[in-house]
Image (cartoon, coloured by chain):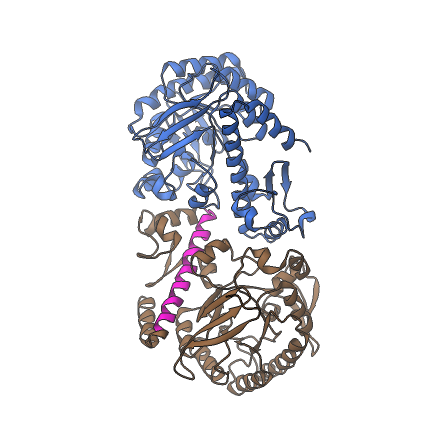
Chain colours: A blue, B brown
């Protein structure tokens, strides 16, 4: 059932704008949406082996172009057989454009119409990213879905800067598309526009005219808060075509996921499950628990009662606490696995609820329980 | 086939003194010997999950009493259901007595006939270990095989000190046995005596009179060199009864393993496969390779051609090099797995060769190839 290109179809979704279940076919298998995409920044989801990802229901992973261009270099990844071979992951992969990292990690940025020059965060060497070089790098990396280079403004940000970011993002989207050379990879456009409704709408409308096979919503979850995030998604999604996948970049808090899925967003990536996992914070249906807490010292219960993940089937909270207290690698490993399974299972529930026409109830139930102790 | 106690039998071994294949039955399953026991210092083989250990042929693991008494405490381990439950490992476990770590890691040691007081290496708190407390701690930890508290002299060491170490080791062996309270656990004695033949022989002979169900050879692989190590093993093993298991503590270099197995030693533990794995050093039949080396940058071959480990089945040298260069956890994880499989497979070969009466040839073949580039 492998496609030779990337294609999306809505499988279930009654409303034009409401939540929907879809299917994203790629040359490396299909993704049932809504789906959560774990982050494998440097060509590895930190501490988790690909066969474990598969086992716990992960369908697609993300890798960061910025990091991989710096190390080991996109040419090296290509020489190693591309990202799939290198990562030992034969499922779908998505790479971002590098834009977000250039604007959040690098120093001494200089932005021109041509592209962006910056000093990288590793050795400070001067580098340059253009729409053409970002696409070329992603062609070499070989992910199934790749992204047009965008300009991601911070929050808060003066309106003129957001306006300029949208102007460049749109120009670069055209140039990215013109530079794209690999028909097996889908190149998606990214909607920017900060929290300015007219700019979001202008950006979305113009990208839709360019007819990308998928649309990302970028520059969200950067500090604007849950309410504004929801608004931005709402303004944007209503302008995106129903038959194309919608991807909210960097969105991963439970309440934001429920809101976004309710609006018809299909894909999400976020470092939360793995980063929190490395910091001893465990996701449970009743909210987050901190496993370094002394109270778990002799606790023989699993992280979450009834959880079907490999960690909960074998290890107690007491063991996890000991592993973190002892700085043992197995702590971050086991907890990342649990947290990723928490996310995968949450999305399985959401997809089922959408199919059964009861997403709103399901989402409210999840939120009531998850945030009850907040 | 689970025993309710620990028992050993020689399964194949024609000579009184030569290499032999044996079977160590424990309440958590049997170990076919000669066997390599990976080190899980703080109740975890660093970075490797127990189901992976099982999958790559690991039969038994070791945990360090000294470390576990310090953190989380042997009472906490007991409250968490014992080491097996805590580690998520239902196979055989061995704990050492803590003696070696007291003499190698702690500070301000004071040794009396009663026991040893020291400041621990974590917070400098003063602690005390006696034969009775070491056994009580190990009874609480719940390993299948536990060790009598010994005094492990450094190398080199004045003869008078080694003599004193043997005197205390023998007294403490008696007291350890008297203090042992759990019939499901086997308590083994440890032969000390440095590189002094008469002291090794005196210690071995006296321990054999005490009729321990198994004998460890301690105070080896502490800097005395391959030739002296071999001599010490030879002097000692000839005095140990044929029907009891023999365990060379901390021995793990390939040439030492071949020598020891040839002399009829059955069990070995060593940090080498995991510690080297964390340092990017990979074991192969042709010797060690350093995966941080620039030459592996675009190398698509597995670590070792033909290796059946999960790492070699999926990942290239180039990926491993990238993971280590990027300080990604997956590097140490994947390489520890490969190295542990290398050891497990080496022992599988040795056991087969012993059964087929060709251990000497096999051992020589392994050494010729492994050290060819030295």
Q: Is residue A337 magenta?
A: no
Front residue of this view, candidates B113 and A159: B113
Q: Is residue A374 visible?
A: no
Residue at position x 47%, y 63% in the image: B59
Front residue of this view, candidates A65 and B129: B129
Magenta-drawn segment = B327-353
Residue A339 in percent (x, y) is at 54, 40
Residue B185 in percent (x, y) is at 60, 70
Residue at position x 68%, y 60% in the image: B75
Residue at position x 37%, y 27% in the image: A130
- Decide: is B315 above or below B181: above
Can you tell which quarter of the image residue B34 is in? Answer: bottom left
Can you tell which quarter of the image residue B365 is in? Answer: bottom left
Q: Is residue B334 magenta?
A: yes
Is residue A118 toward the left or the right of residue B69 in the image? Answer: left
Which quadrant: the C terminus of chain B?
bottom left
Label count reads 0
Residue A178 in percent (x, y) is at 30, 22
Q: Residue furthest front?
A: B1
């Amino acid at each position: 059932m492998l496609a030779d290109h990337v294609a999306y179809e809505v499988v279930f979704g009654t409303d034009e704008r409401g939540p929907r279940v879809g299917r994203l076919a790629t040359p490396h298998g299909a993704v049932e949406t809504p789906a959560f995409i774990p982050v494998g920044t440097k060509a590895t989801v930190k501490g988790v082996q690909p066969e474990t990802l598969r086992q716990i229901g992960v369908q697609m992973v993300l890798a960061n172009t910025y990091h991989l261009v710096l190390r080991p270099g996109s040419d090296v990844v290509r020489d190693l057989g591309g990202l799939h071979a290198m990562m030992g992951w034969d499922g779908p992969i998505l790479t971002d454009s590098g834009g977000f990292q250039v604007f959040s990690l690098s120093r001494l940025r200089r932005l021109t119409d041509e592209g962006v020059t910056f000093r990288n965060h590793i050795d400070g060497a001067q580098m340059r990213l253009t729409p053409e070089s970002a696409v070329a790098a992603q062609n070499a990396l070989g992910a199934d879905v790749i992204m047009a280079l965008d300009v991601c403004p911070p929050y808060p940000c003066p309106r003129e800067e957001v306006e300029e970011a949208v102007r460049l993002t749109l120009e670069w989207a055209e140039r990215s598309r013109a530079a794209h050379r690999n028909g097996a990879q889908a190149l998606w456009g990214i909607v920017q526009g900060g929290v300015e409704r007219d700019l979001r709408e202008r950006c979305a409308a113009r990208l839709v005219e360019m007819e990308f096979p998928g649309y990302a919503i970028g520059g969200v979850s950067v500090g604007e808060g849950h309410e504004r995030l929801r608004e931005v998604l709402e303004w944007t999604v209503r302008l995106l075509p129903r038959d194309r996948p919608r991807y909210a970049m960097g969105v991963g808090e439970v309440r934001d996921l429920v809101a976004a899925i309710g609006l018809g967003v299909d894909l999400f990536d976020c470092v939360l499950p793995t980063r929190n996992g490395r910091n001893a914070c465990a996701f449970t249906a009743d909210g987050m628990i901190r496993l370094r807490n002394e109270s778990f010292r002799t606790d023989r219960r699993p992280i979450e009662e009834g959880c079907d993940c490999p960690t909960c089937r074998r290890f107690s909270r007491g063991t996890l606490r000991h592993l973190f207290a002892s700085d043992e690698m197995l702590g971050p490993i086991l907890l990342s696995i649990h947290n990723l399974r928490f996310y995968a299972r949450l999305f399985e529930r959401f997809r089922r609820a959408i199919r059964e026409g009861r997403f709103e109830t399901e989402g409210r139930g999840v939120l009531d329980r998850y945030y009850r102790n907040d």
